[in-house]
Image: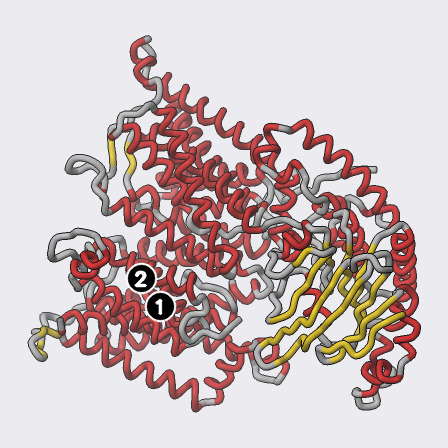
Amino acid sequence: MDAEPLLSVREVYKRFGGVTALDGVSVTVPAGLIYGLIGPNGSGKTTLFNVVTGFTAADAGNVSFAGQPLDRLAPYRVARLGLIRTFQATLCPLRMTVMENMLLAPQQQLGDSVANAFLRAAEVRRQEREHLERARALLETVNLADKADDYAGSLSGGQRKLLALAQALMAGPRLVLLDEPVAGVNPRLIEEIAAVIRRLRNDGQNFLIVEHNMHFIRTICDQVSVLDAGRVIAEGAAEDVLAREDVLRAYLGRRRGGAGKAAVR
Amino acid sequence: MLQVLIDSAIRSAELSFLAVGLTMVYSVLRFANFAHVEFATVGAYLALGLSTTVGLPLWLAAALAILIAGGLGVGIDRVIFSRLRTASPIMLMIASFALGIAMREAVRAIWGPSPFFYNLGILPPWRFLGAFVTPTQVAVIAAAVVAMLAFHFLLSRTTLGIAMRATADNATLSQASGIATDRVIRSVWFIGAGFAALGGVLVGLNTQIKPDMGFGLIIEVFSAAIVGGIGSPYGAILGAILVGFAENVGLAIDWSPVLNAIGFDVGPFTYIPTGYKAAVAFSLLILTLLIRPRGLLGART
Amino acid sequence: MTEFLVYLITIAAIWGILSLSLNLQFGIAGLVNLGHVAFFMLGAYTSTILVVIAGWPIVVGVVAGAIAAALFGMLLALPAANLKEDYWAISTLAAAEIVRIIFLNTRLGGPYVGEAFGVSGIPRPLRDWFDANGYSLADYNLFYMVLVLVVLAACFALVRYLAATPFGRSLKALREGDEVPLALGKSVGGLRIRVMAVGGALAGLAGALFAHYNAFISPEYFLPLETFIVWAMIILGGPGNFLGALVGTVIIQALYNSTRFIAPLLNIDAQVLGPLRMITISVAIILVIMYMPRGIVPERRRRYGR
């Protein structure tokens, strides 16, 4: 495991107005496993995601991906390096069908260029067919194959999460960043999503997952970092970290009698 | 020079009546109402009709016109915009643009395209420090000052006014905390349309009454509202002052020293042609949008 | 009567190209362009200036018109990233008005050429050939009508095709927000620039076609009202559907011109006719927005089957 870490976040700071969202956060994500980023609401997880993927600029610190610095790169350039993310609010365009959503994802399509669309039309069509095949296969893995021609807006919340996952994978990423992939999803579907992710990990796909459903994290994450109030308070193998007193307290302790609340989310 | 300042003040006064209402509707309902300027046109024509056909004295006709215009604003919201609360801002914009056309053309259909004038007779202008001011121009400025002060009083001292400001800041929160948002919305339409109508009457007094009188001001009004910070009534007033002065002063000054300094070799007496007057407001608008989109007093979104 | 019909169809076809252009920008890409008439104007004036004043061939003028409009479109697209949707919309309106004001105040040739006087004597393509071979004006107008219809058909095929490419797909995603396209590696700024360029080029082409048909242009033809009418066409027809855009064009054009015939029947005063026409269209738009926001021919999904 001496290989270069896949994603390296070093001493990142971010303030919004009077609030310090990230207070010197450092995270190292090695390749070949499912890494979790957990913590209670407001701990800075999504902000960190936004900084890593270029949607928010950090005030200080740096981020590099497979040795390449990501500072100040526009989000689309970060994506083109192989870092594909989903969004907490599942933003898959609702007025496009499931299949259209999938076909959106592949990187560097010939047909992205207006000129090529006309000058190399046959090749563009060929690429479409290839993508269509791959998309169908991916949709099978997430059980959405029969919904291919349905509008994304007609899917249930859980199904949209699956679509977002499939869409991210369709982009052929080196690292998939999932932002709360099971928030608000019913438990049976959560199991399904966990199984899919585990299968993909076994096939070599790297994941960085932000979640605050502890049970989900426990079942699929290999390693985790725990954030609280913008700081990393623990990191290491998932089992060990999730058994720690201070971690549990961060999740449950500060809520007045809210022992059950965090777990339910 | 004093003449330019007076012209600027008058223009600012006229624009402020329109800009304030526009910005209020935007702050509460989150869309740019392209039909807003037509309340000025309608108000002016109503006052005209009431004073000539019905024979009321002008001040009474104007007062009634303002009330009717206010009611029209509430009615329009009830019939059209209340059903579009969930529509996208662009649909609202297009609908309001269509409404503006309908209002304007209705006026044109009823009164015809030729300009009218209020029947005040000839009033001799007064001399004021070397410049000429007509009584109507004084009326415009005085009315603006009084109205804005009254409006300020409304916003800061009355429950309604405070509710309006709260709703402007956060509509969902206001509704949740029990402020009757519907009442606020009605008030905003009534006051906004009423103010616009008053502005229209004053513009009509000062220049002429024609179907395009409101629409002719649309970009200046939008510029004033946006430069000042859309959503902020005080911003609208400030914006109106800036646009009014920029237009008049900008056209009055001789730009040759500035141009020569930058390197353009122009003769003396280089002025912006009057045809470009509206372009001054446009340019302010574009500048604001590029440099500081929230305007001077607007909230950071 | 046929003469009038030929004229109507020609004008409707030109508006049709405008609708397709705006539908690409708004219906597909979600861009609220309130300054669309500027493309029309730049196409018309560029071709006119190059052909009438500089003496270049009409074909060159038309192409240059399309290019000029495309460049303006790209210019408009540049600040879109930093501006909220409605602010950008308003600035397109302002930009279009500035363009019109500039043409309104610019002399383009001798006295009475340009400014508010407009430019007349714009040559019509192949007119001389028709004259020389003994064809009448009516024959020529028929020819021009067919010409414009062919161009319209080509534009229709073009935009339909583009919308089905990965580029078009990215535009449709852009409609609903920048985040997903960005997260999937698409340069949203580049997308906006390209769609405004293509849309601009089409509208500029329409402008040049209009100039060489009408033989006369002036700033009066390019008021913000024109933009609104094109918006009315696509909203009525169905934003996102190019066939819908054409349907909307036909309906609005029919409404606009039919009042001419209805008026004598209903004994309407000529002065009221114009306003009444506009009121009808406006009310129709408001009703469509309130009760049928997806338009007459709603956008259709592409099915991929199993």
Whether residue B62 sits left or right of residue C15 in the image: it is left
Q: Residues within 10 Å of mark 1 (few under 14, many from 20)?
A: many
The chain holding disc 1 is B
Q: Which amino acid does the dot numbered 1 rest on?
A: Ala
Residue A168's label in the rendered image is: none
Q: Is residue A171 above or below residue C120?
A: below
Whether residue A258 sits left or right of residue C125 in the image: it is right
Q: Is residue A89 above or below residue B172?
A: above
The quarter of the displayed image where residue B190 is located: bottom left
Residue C44: horizontal and vertical position, in percent? 35, 35
Q: Which amino acid does the dot numbered 2 rest on?
A: Ala
On whether disc 1 and disc 2 are found on a single subunit, the reply is: yes
Whether residues under marks 1 and 2 lie with C-beta atoms below 8 angstroms apart, the answer is yes
Residue C19: horizontal and vertical position, in percent? 49, 40
Q: Name the residue under label 2.
A: B281
Residue found at the very far front of the displayed protein: A2
Residue A259: horizontal and vertical position, in percent? 86, 85
Quarter occupied by the N terminus of chain C: top left
Q: In this view, does A37 lie above or below C252?
A: below
Q: Quick one: label 1 or label 2, which is nearer the N terminus?
A: 1
At a point 46% along the width and 45% down the height, the residue shown is C74
Whether residue A94 sits left or right of residue B82 in the image: it is right
Q: Mark 1 points at which residue?
A: B224
Work out whether residue C68 or residue A61 is closer to the camera in this orientation and state it: A61
Q: How crowded is mark 2: few (under 14 residues within 10 Å), some or many (20 or more)?
A: many
Quarter occupied by the C terminus of chain C: top right
